[in-house]
Amino acid sequence: MRISVPDLIFGFSRALDMVKPQLAGHHLGVAWIASELGQALSLPRTVRAQLFTAAMLHDAGAIPLKVSADDLLFERNTWLHTRAGWALLSRCAFLRPAASFVLFHHTPWSRLRDSGEALLPANLIHLADRAELFLRGGALLDASALESLLARHAGGKFHPDGVEALRALCARRGGRLALPSAQEMKHDLQTDCAQPDLDPDHLIPFCFLFSLITDFLSPFTATHTAGVAHTACILHRRHMLGTTGSVDPEENRKVFVAGLLHDIGKLGVPRALLEKEGPLDHDEFAQMKRHAEFSLSLLDNIPGLEDIRLWGALHHERLNGRGYPLGLAGGQLPLPSRIMAVADIFTALMEDRPYRKGMSLARALDILQTMEDNGHIDGTVLATLRAEAERINRVRAGAQRRARRRFDELYRICAEPVESDVRAFSACFNPPPPHPPTDSASGR
Ligand SMILES: [Fe+2]
Ligand SMILES: [Fe+2]
Ligand SMILES: [Fe+2]
């Protein structure tokens, strides 16, 4: 299982864009401009790859902190989303260089100068961010528009070489810079930012990052993905051992990653629905159901991720064909997606929500039994869950407790508007890398 990094990042950045439809395509446009500037300044290839990653994910921190689109447009309270973005990305060891670019992507160059050129890419993202917002909706950056944009942001905000590179980019394009089509930008970026494929050891932390962003959409869902991924992983392992006597470790790892990504489509659901305390009405439920279809489409066209995409996105399908998004039935549903369905329902029943406590194990198993009787879920998977219920529930509860601590920690890091200082952040946010659960995980 090896996945192309740009392919994965394109999919994930589309997911980020779904949260703020007013800014759709923003990450791609910023990455394209920043990459053009990076090439013009002859930044080394490895730095350009980090610049691409940081630019494609630079506003990720705006999601958990509910930073508004206007705050991003007008650069208000920028320390909030830059710090949250840094805290999220730096959980992944191989994303740490990109994380520091995210942290400083609104800091004026006059305050970054002491870093030498190390933080130049952060400042290129800043410049590209302002240029992209100007160019949105088909605007053109000609010589006079460029000068007025730069005048608006005078006072040592941008590195002079970055400004010169932007002028040269305009000149190269006949004096009038416009954003190319999304397809053209992706093509250019794929050509410039080729990097080694992700192996499974890096894929898990990377997908874990997106599971955090999905969970952190709302305090209501802050631990759900962690619970489903861990439950599905251990349920799959116990089920395969019980029914075939062996487990394919690669398949088991894919089930874990599918659990991490199963609800990524929730980034496309209005936050008010995710946080509604009472029952959803008919229209609201129809909107909520679309998250499964979004999960399916966001992870489309990523070679190597085909199984993970299906196993995750089909978690609301039902054996009797009455589920969604595709209405598949019986033999059309692969076993890992049936396991995902049971893990998702089990986690939802057991977890605490702000408006209700989690259920007892006995009550949750009763409800699942009724669902099996009605042809919704796989009886053999439920039998495995029932036989190992205490053990599986301990793993689920432990994963959700750890997820709750991560959520609280992110808010603590972002609570005080102090000057950005990477060392101070590292001291309080130094997480262990995520792993699929083992059978011995007690969850304590
Ligand atoms: Fe930003
Ligand atoms: Fe931005
Ligand atoms: Fe779901």
Image (cartoon, rainbow, N blue to C red):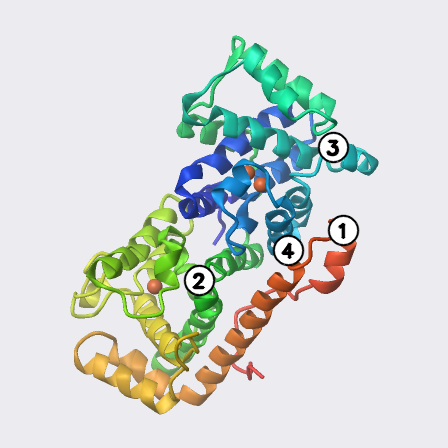
- Where is residue 126 drawn, in percent x and y? 63, 33
- Where is residue 110 drawn, in percent x and y? 77, 32
The one of 431 and 386 positioned closer to us in this rendering: 431
Real-space Cα separation, disc 3 to disc 4, in angstroms: 22 Å
Three-letter amino acid code of the residue under disc 1 = Asp
Mark 4 or 2, closer to the camera: 4
Q: Residue at horizontal 59%, vertical 68%?
A: 408
Q: Residue at horizontal 54%, vertical 40%?
A: 72
Real-space Cα separation, disc 3 to disc 1, in angstroms: 16 Å
User: Residue 254 shows which numbered tag?
Assistant: 2
Three-letter amino acid code of the residue under disc 4 = Ala
Real-space Cα separation, disc 2 to disc 3, in angstroms: 43 Å
Three-letter amino acid code of the residue under disc 3 = Trp
User: Residue 421 shows which numbered tag?
Assistant: 1
The one of 134 and 5 positioned closer to us in this rendering: 134
* Residue at which label 3 appears: 109
Mark 1 or 4, closer to the camera: 1
